[in-house]
Amino acid sequence: PRIDEAWRPAYHFTPPARWMNDPNGLVYLDGRYHLFYQYHPDSTLWGPMHWGHAVSPDLVHWTDRPVALAPDALGMIFSGSAAVDRTNSAGLAGELARQGSKPPLVALFTYHNEAVKQAGGLPERQGLAYSTDSGETWLKYSGNPVLRPGAGQRDFRDPKLLWHGASKSWVVTLAAGDHVAFFGSSDLKTWHPLSRFSTQHRPSDGVWECPDLIPIRVAGTSRTKWLLLHSVNPGGPNGGSATRYIVGDFDGTRFSPDPLFARAIARDGPRWLDWGRDNYAGVTWSGLPDDQDRVVLIGWMNNWDYADKVPTVSWRGAMTLPRELTLHRDVRYGYVLRTAPVRELRALEGESLVLGPQPVSQSLAVPLPESVVNQTKVEVTFTVAPGTTEVGLAWSNTAGDRYTFGYDAARNRWISDRRQSGIVDFSPRFASLDTAPRRNRSSVVRMTLYVDRASVEAFVDGGTTALTTTVFPRSPYTRLELYTKSGPARLLALRALPMRAAFP
Ligand code: FRU
């Protein structure tokens, strides 16, 4: 295969060809998960944005569908969301809904008009679109735009729709520069301002993008809190673009952060959905089927620092694994999120290789077949001897490329090193050593990693810390080993599960 096809993930979504960025319009209807995405069908560079489209029965296997929304006289189609209009509140289904046929799918997206921007005007307003055939084809509402920016609001985009059951109305969360703005509507066509919210600490922080407001159950209780997500570019914990979260309450008008959470982030800085360089613009699915409490997110596995330079040839940009978010009580923050890849991915797991307790000194090879080393889930538990400075997993190839993810005992942090992971010179910002603070000091160290040819997603601290990284090895990684630095460790257990391909 061509090298860029060698980097094509086997179980992560990528566009059939050309450029992709943010996930858009995540919605479930009639047995199908929809994934729309920022798409430039004519180039592997960002350009006039469309909504690309794929559907899946299980969040794992995706089928490409035709482009859903294309630019028009009002502008390009930037990011946005979709929902099922169960009551036909917008009347867009016309006779159909009255006759008891399917409720329409509705989408709210941003029109971005570059000519208006060049002329010094406000380039962004929101448009409405709908589908009465389960998302196959989309019509734009003839009265667009439905929501215009206020004076001076240059950044005004990425609307995330929410049906607020308690007030029986729609709420949309928009990114507006250094804050989010909430608007309300009963029919999706006329919107009134509700409130705004910000935690901006420093003016140097980047622009807010792709917000999401989600009710979420507190694990082990029957209480519901509200989760506010927003992406920020730049300002990520390891540089470039990344996504933050805030836990609080929403009364239909106003979002108020939980007091303990607010104090903790004012003191320690923001909480990150992911500490890695490659998880941006993530948002959650609307209208999930089986259980109302489920919150599932997917992110764009890339970073605006170098997204337009990554060395793939026929396509650019992949999604993260779909991840389930759960909310847990926490002494320090009041509440913290845990993230884990969705259980549906287990369908791809092959026969496991298990290593039992044994000492590790410098290096211990994990005897996997070479062909599956770069397409595997690995769960590993160590204990670290006093004096040992680092333990972890290393993927390498015969070209001399090496990626490591480990625990830096000296500084009690997680450490991801892609400085020698393969082709790194396409951007001066790519070859990074990224870190995340560890949340306890136990000598027992546990990590779960998913590698898929050109990416590594690490879940540690029971899922309260995630770190996602892309890599471009010159040839596939064929060797996996456990490593230690300046002293030994004891392996307690390792399980490696080859992941079958989800795409032909
Ligand atoms: C985030 C973003 C959004 C915008 C889209 C444009 O990555 O900048 O704010 O809607 O990408 O493609």
Image (cartoon, rainbow, N blue to C red):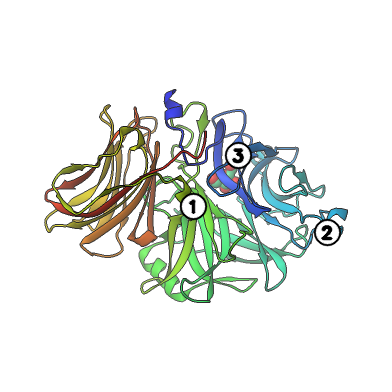
Q: Position of residue 241 (x, y in %)?
A: 45, 47
Q: Is residue 104 above or below residue 198?
A: above
Specify whether residue 153 is in view. Answer: no
Seen from the viewer's position, the closer of residues 384 and 378 is: 378
**Of label 1 and label 3, which has the lower sequence position?**
3
Quadrant of the frame with the N terminus: top left
Residue furthest to the top in view is 2
Residue indicated by mark 2: 100
Residue type for callout 1: Val
Q: Position of residue 384 (x, y in %)?
A: 17, 57
| Pointer 2 local density, CA inside 10 Å: few below 14, some 14–19, many at least 20 | few
Seen from the viewer's position, the closer of residues 49 and 455 is: 455
Q: Nearer the viewer, mark 1 or mark 2?
A: 2
Residue type for callout 2: Gly
| Pointer 3 local density, CA inside 10 Å: few below 14, some 14–19, many at least 20 | some
Residue indicated by mark 1: 232
Taking 254 as reference, is 481 left or right? left
Q: Quadrant of residue 43?
A: top right
Taking 382 as reference, is 314 left or right? right
Residue type for callout 3: Thr
Residue 63 marker: 3
- Gap between marks 2 and 3 measured at Cα: 29 Å
**Of label 2 and label 3, which has the lower sequence position?**
3
Specify whether residue 225 is in view. Answer: yes
Number of callouts? 3
Q: Is residue 70 above or below residue 34?
A: above
Q: Position of residue 499 (x, y in %)?
A: 41, 42
Q: Nearer the viewer, mark 1 or mark 3?
A: 3
Q: Are marks 2 and 3 in contact (CB under 8 Å)?
A: no
| Pointer 1 local density, CA inside 10 Å: few below 14, some 14–19, many at least 20 | many
